[in-house]
Amino acid sequence: MPAPLLQLGFADRYERLRYRTALLLYVLVILIGDIPGVRADVGQYASGGVLHSFGYGVLALILFSGTAGGMARRALLSVLMVAAMGALDEFIQSFLPYRHGAVSDWVVDITAATAVVLPLSFLWPGMAAAALKKARG
């Protein structure tokens, strides 16, 4: 992987950028997912559980990488943020006639976030150190 990409993915100075990227992706998920018919079209290729697991798992990864502090703090804040994002997503869906909010989807969001950040809590320090060492050459 090229050095600039490794820096973007792991360097502390880009944490804020990664965090903002997660927020932007979340907004895109909400906007695109709430367009009439889009969710039904995507549903032909992936179930709601798969979409929620993948989408909120990726958000948790980016949030984890974009949160400053120790591993426990990153993990906790990432899962809490995903829980809030998932709850807002389901709340918005409950007002749309062609969608419905579901607590089960919210549980999948939180489970996916936890499944991503738990191993990252242990692996991240070594991954970041190795990536940044490789980026330095």
Image (cartoon, helix red, strand yellow):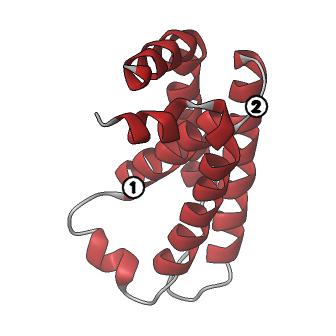
Nearer-the-camera pick, 108 or 65: 65
Above or below, 29 relative to 120: below
- Identify the residue position indicated by label 1 in the image: 51
Q: Percent from the top left, x then y, of residue 10?
A: 53, 30
Can you give x and y, in whole percent of width and height, for residue 117 in the image? 57, 26
Q: Quadrant of residue 67?
A: top right
- In the foreground, 94 or 28: 28
Q: What's the residue at 44%, 15% (across, down)? A: 133
Residue 68 circle label: 2
Amino acid type shown at disc 1: Leu
**Is 58 above or below relative to 64?**
below
Left or right: 136 in relation to 10:
left
- Return the disc, 1 or 2, that comes first in the chain's sequence: 1
Q: CA distance from mark 1 to mark 2?
A: 28 Å
Amino acid of disc 2: Ala
Tell me the element at label 2. Answer: loop
Contact flag, marks 1 and 2 (Cβ < 8 Å) = no
Q: Residue at x 42, y 33 (%)?
A: 6
Name the secondary structure under disc 1: helix
